[in-house]
C-alpha cells in the first residue's frame, strides 16, 4: 500500500517584481496513514506555502515549479481542476490559521459545514444538517442545534476555530492539514483545541500535518517533526529524538528560546538575527549568518539533509536527518552544545540546550 | 434625486469668520485619473516606444571594496513617460542582475522559469528601486560557492526582454576588489 502522502523535491517560487522568492526549495517528506506530522519553523520558513501546495492552492504570482505530491500514490499536480476539487475538503481537509477570515460572514456556520457534506458525500439537506449538528457537538460547541443557525460573528474565537475543525472533519478526511490552528487563541483554549484535534484524529484514524512555530504544540501532538528554515528542511526526526537529541544548530536555537518557568537565566535565549530574505539567500548554508558554530566552510557549501548516524544523504526512510556540514565534511570545532534534561519539570519545557548555544551566541554578540 | 449639497442645510458665508466658505473648486477636475491608462497605453503605445520610456541604472556606493566585504548596489528602473507603460518580458522573471555575465553571480542556472511571458508594469513617472548585495562569491555548483579573486568585476542589471533590445533596458557598473 502506498504511503498516504509523499512530497518529493517540491519547489515553489513566487515571481515578484523585487525578485524571485523561492518559498519552498527541493522539499521532500512523507506522512503515513494516521501519523501526526509536525512542521515547525519561524515565520517565512515556507511552512504554509508547503501546506497550500499540497492542496494546490498557491495563487499567482506563485508557481509550483517542480516536484511531485503523491497522495495515495496519485500525483496531485497532474489532476484536473475538478479532480483536485473532489479531493479538497473531502480526502484532504485544511484547518486555516485565522478562523474568522476562513469563515464566510454572510452564511451561517452550520450552512458552511453542511455545504461540504452535501457536496462531497451526497447527503440530503436534512441529513447534512443532522451530521453538522453532531459534528458541532463533537467539537464541543454547546447547544449545537441552536448554534447551527448562528453567523460567524456570533461565535467566539475558540468556537470559530472549533467550527473550522468540525468542517475539516465533516467528510472523514484521510489527512488534515492544520496551519497554525491555535495561533490566534489563548493558551487554555489552545490546549482544549489541541486535545480535541488529537482525540478526533485518533478516533477517525486521520493523519495530521500540523504546522506551527510553537515547539510545545508539536511535543503535545506529533509523532514526527520536520524543522524548516528558509524554505528548506534542516532536521527531520521522531518528536522525542528531536527534543532529547537535536542535531541541527537551528533546532537547538529554537529549543533554547522556549521560555521556562523557574529558569534562573536573566534573559530569554534567542537566535540572533532574522530569517534571510528569500529573494537573496546567503551563500552556503542559509543558516550560517545566525549560527554560533558557523565556520568558513559553511559559507561555501550548502549541506544536504544527511542521516546523522551514517553520514549518507538522507532518504524519505531516514529516521533522523539534519542538514549541517558537521554530518558531511565535519566542522573543525564541531557542534559543542549540550542538552540538559531537567526531570523536575516533567515536561518538554524542562529541556535545556545550555553550553554551546548560549556561550557561542554571546561570543558572536561580542564580535558584532 | 436631490443632493445633500443642494439642500441648503449648511449655512455658508465668505465674510463670517467661523462659517464654512462658499464652495469654490481650486483645482481642475482630473478625470484622466479614471481612464484605464495602463490598458490604453498597452493598446496604442508601440513596443519600441515603450522601451524608450524606461531607463535602467545600476550604482554602487564605492568603486573599490576589500576582499570579503559585501558589495551593495542599487538598481533603479524609471518610467520617464507621463503615461503608464507595460514592458512584456520573456518569462515571469521581470528583471535580472548579473556579475560578469553570471546571473545572480551563479555559473549554474538557478531556476527554470515557466515558459510563459511576464509583464512589467510601470505607472506614469514611476521609479522602482531595488537594493541588492553581492557577497563576493560565485556559485559554481548547485550547492557550492567560491570566493571572487581580487580584480575588476562588472555588475549589470536589465529588464528580461526577449530579442536584442536588451541593451537599451540594461545598465552596468564596475567595481574593484582589492586585498
Image (spheres, coloured by chain):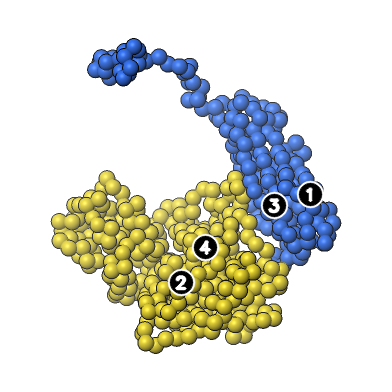
Question: Which chain is painted in yellow?
Answer: A
Q: Are marks 1 and 3 on the same chain?
A: yes
What residue does disc 4 label?
A45
Q: Is residue B136 visible?
A: yes
The residue positioned 24% from the left and 17% from the top of the image is B9
Specify the subunit that label 4 lies on: A
To the question of a shared chain for discs 1 and 2, the answer is no
Q: Is mark 2 on a helix, strand or loop?
A: loop
Residue at the limit of the structure toward the front, as seen here: B17
- Percent across and percent down for residue A281 are 63, 60
Instruction: Determine which residue is flagged by label 1.
Output: B63
Q: Which of marks 3 and 2 is in front?
A: 2
Helix, strand or loop at label 4? It is loop
Of callouts 1 and 3, which one flags the residue occurring earlier in the amino acid sequence? 1
Distance between the alpha carbons at the discs numbered 1 and 4: 35 Å
Label 3 belongs to which residue? B72
Chain bearing tag 3 is B
Q: Left or right: where does residue A220 sit relative to residue A12?
A: left
Tell me where residue A260 appears, x and y as whole percent. 40, 76
> Element type at marker 1?
loop
Determine the chain carrying the residue at label 2.
Answer: A
Chain coloured blue: which letter?
A: B
Residue placed under numbered mark 2 in the picture: A268
Q: CB of mark 3 within 8 Å of CB of mark 4?
A: no
Note whether B100 is above or below A316 in the view shown.
Answer: above
10 Å crowding of disc 4: few (<14), some (14-19), many (20+): many
A112 vs B12, nearest the viewer: B12
Amino acid at each position: 500500500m502506498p504511503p498516504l502522502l509523499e512530497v518529493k523535491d517540491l519547489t515553489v517560487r513566487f515571481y515578484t517584481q523585487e525578485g524571485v522568492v523561492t518559498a519552498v526549495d527541493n522539499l521532500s517528506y512523507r506522512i503515513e496513514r494516521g501519523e501526526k506530522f509536525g512542521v515547525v519553523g519561524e515565520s517565512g520558513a515556507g511552512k504554509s506555502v508547503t501546506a497550500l501546495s499540497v492542496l494546490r492552492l498557491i495563487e499567482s504570482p506563485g508557481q509550483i515549479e517542480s516536484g511531485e505530491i503523491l497522495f495515495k500514490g496519485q500525483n496531485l499536480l497532474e489532476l484536473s481542476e475538478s479532480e483536485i476539487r473532489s479531493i479538497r475538503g473531502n480526502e484532504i481537509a485544511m484547518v486555516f490559521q485565522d478562523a474568522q477570515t476562513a469563515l464566510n460572514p454572510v452564511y451561517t456556520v452550520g450552512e458552511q459545514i453542511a455545504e461540504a457534506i452535501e457536496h462531497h458525500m451526497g447527503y440530503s439537506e436534512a441529513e447534512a444538517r443532522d451530521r453538522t449538528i453532531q459534528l458541532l457537538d463533537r467539537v464541543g460547541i454547546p447547544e449545537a442545534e441552536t448554534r447551527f443557525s448562528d453567523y460567524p460573528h456570533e461565535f467566539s474565537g475558540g468556537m470559530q476555530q472549533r467550527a473550522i475543525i468540525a468542517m475539516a472533519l465533516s467528510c472523514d478526511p484521510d489527512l488534515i492539514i492544520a496551519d497554525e490552528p491555535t495561533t490566534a487563541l489563548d493558551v487554555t483554549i489552545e490546549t482544549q483545541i489541541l486535545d480535541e484535534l488529537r482525540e478526533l484524529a485518533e478516533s477517525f484514524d486521520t493523519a495530521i500535518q500540523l504546522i506551527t512555530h510553537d515547539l510545545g504544540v508539536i511535543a503535545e501532538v506529533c509523532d514526527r517533526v520536520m524543522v524548516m528554515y528558509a524554505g528548506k528542511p534542516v532536521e527531520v526526526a521522531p518528536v522525542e529524538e528531536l527534543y532529547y537529541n537535536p542535531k541541527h544548530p537551528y533546532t537547538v536555537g529554537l529549543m533554547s528560546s522556549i521560555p521556562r518557568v523557574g529558569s534562573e537565566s536573566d534573559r530569554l535565549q534567542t537566535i540572533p538575527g532574522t530569517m534571510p530574505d528569500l529573494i537573496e539567500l546567503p551563500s552556503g548554508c542559509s543558516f550560517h549568518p545566525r549560527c554560533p558554530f558557523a565556520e568558513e566552510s559553511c559559507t561555501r557549501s550548502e549541506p544536504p539533509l544527511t542521516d546523522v548516524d551514517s553520514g549518507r544523504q538522507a532518504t524519505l526512510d531516514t529516521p533522523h536527518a539534519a542538514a549541517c556540514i558537521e554530518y558531511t565534511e565535519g566542522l573543525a570545532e564541531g557542534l559543542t552544545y549540550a542538552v540538559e534534561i531537567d526531570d523536575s519539570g516533567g515536561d518538554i519545557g524542562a529541556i535545556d540546550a545550555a553550553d554551546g548555544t548560549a556561550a557561542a551566541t554571546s561570543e558572536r554578540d561580542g564580535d558584532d | 434625486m436631490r443632493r445633500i449639497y443642494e439642500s441648503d442645510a449648511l449655512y455658508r458665508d465668505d465674510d463670517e469668520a467661523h462659517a464654512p466658505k462658499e464652495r469654490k473648486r481650486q483645482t481642475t477636475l482630473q478625470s484622466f485619473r479614471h481612464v484605464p491608462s495602463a490598458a490604453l497605453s498597452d493598446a496604442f503605445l508601440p513596443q519600441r516606444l515603450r522601451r524608450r520610456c524606461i531607463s535602467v541604472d545600476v550604482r554602487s556606493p564605492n568603486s573599490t571594496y576589500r576582499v570579503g566585504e559585501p558589495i551593495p548596489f542599487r538598481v533603479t528602473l524609471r518610467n520617464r513617460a507621463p503615461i503608464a507603460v507595460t514592458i512584456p518580458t520573456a518569462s515571469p522573471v521581470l528583471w535580472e542582475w548579473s556579475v560578469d555575465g553570471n546571473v545572480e553571480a551563479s555559473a549554474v542556472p538557478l531556476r527554470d522559469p515557466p515558459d510563459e511571458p511576464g509583464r512589467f508594469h510601470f505607472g506614469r513617472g514611476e521609479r522602482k528601486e531595488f537594493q541588492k548585495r553581492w557577497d563576493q562569491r560565485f556559485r559554481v555548483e548547485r550547492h557550492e560557492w567560491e570566493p571572487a579573486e581580487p580584480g575588476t568585476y562588472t555588475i549589470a542589471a536589465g529588464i528580461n526582454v526577449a530579442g536584442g533590445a536588451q541593451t537599451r533596458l540594461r545598465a552596468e557598473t564596475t567595481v574593484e576588489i582589492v586585498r
